[in-house]
């Protein structure tokens, strides 16, 4: 099976997934915007089992952004790495931190109503 690897800007946090990706999507909710500093974030789910953090920093630092969700980031460079929902067997990973961001194509957009009016977005068809 394909493996998906990636990491933050400084390399402190590195991850590798042995599991299959699912639900690749954009999210333009206000929490994703404020957490990342970007108008929209591309996410993909990987099974928590088989997802390994291999960089010198180990697992990302966590910030609880809502009652049921924690956001993982690099404590050194601040890069947005993942979101972890309480009780879920999946972890959301930011597609843009993959070593090959073209490897996974977002197929939908969550919270389109929160996207800035100036953002022009095309949803590509999966290749
Ligand atoms: Zn970093
Ligand atoms: Zn969001």
Image (cartoon, rainbow, N blue to C red):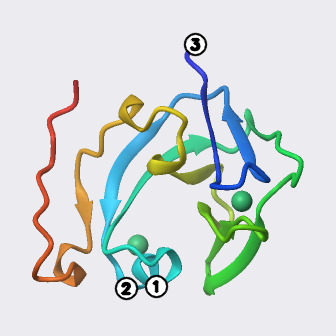
Left or right of 42 in this view: 127:
left
Q: Is mark 3 within 8 Å of ligand 1?
A: no
* Above or below, comparing residue 14 to residue 109 in the picture: above
Dot 3 surroundings within 10 Å: few (below 14), some, or many (20 or more)? few
Does residue 40 appear left or right of residue 84 in this picture? left
Task: Say which of 61 and 56 sits in front.
Answer: 56
Mark 2 and mark 3: span between their CA atoms?
A: 35 Å
| 2 vs 1, front mark | 1
State which quadrant residue 77 falls in: bottom right
Circles 3 and 1, Cβ within 8 Å, touching? The answer is no
Bin the neighbour count of mark 1 within 10 Å (Cα to Cα): few under 14, some 14-19, many 20 and up. Answer: few
The x, y position of residue 90, in whole percent, is 60, 49
The residue under label 1 is 34
The residues bearing labels 3 and 1 have C-alpha atoms spaced at a distance of 35 Å
Instruction: Quickly name the residue at label 2.
Output: 30
The dot on residue 121 is: none
Which residue occupies 49% across, 74% down? 36
Quadrant hosting ligand 2: bottom left
Residue 120 at x, y = what percent?
10, 65
Classify 37 as above or below 120. below
C-alpha span from label 2 to label 1: 6 Å
Quarter the N terminus occupies: top right
Q: Residues within 10 Å of mark 2 (few under 14, many from 20)?
A: some
Residue 1 shows which numbered tag?
Answer: 3
Which residue extends farthest front? 10
Q: Are marks 2 and 1 in contact (CB under 8 Å)?
A: yes
User: Does label 2 or label 3 sit earlier along the sequence?
Assistant: 3
Q: Which type of secondary structure does the marked residue at label 3 adopt?
A: loop
């Amino acid at each position: 099976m394909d493996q998906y690897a990636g990491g933050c800007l400084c390399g402190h946090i590195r991850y590798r997934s042995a599991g299959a990706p699912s639900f690749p999507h954009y999210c333009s909710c206000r929490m994703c915007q404020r957490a990342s500093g970007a108008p929209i974030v591309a996410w993909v789910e990987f099974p928590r089992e088989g997802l390994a953090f291999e960089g010198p920093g180990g697992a990302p630092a966590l910030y609880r952004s809502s009652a049921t969700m924690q956001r993982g980031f690099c404590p050194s460079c601040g890069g947005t790495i993942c979101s972890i929902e309480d009780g879920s067997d999946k972890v959301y990973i930011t597609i843009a931190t993959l070593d090959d961001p073209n490897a996974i194509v977002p197929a939908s957009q969550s919270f389109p109503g929160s996207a800035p009016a100036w953002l022009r977005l095309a949803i590509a068809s999966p290749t």
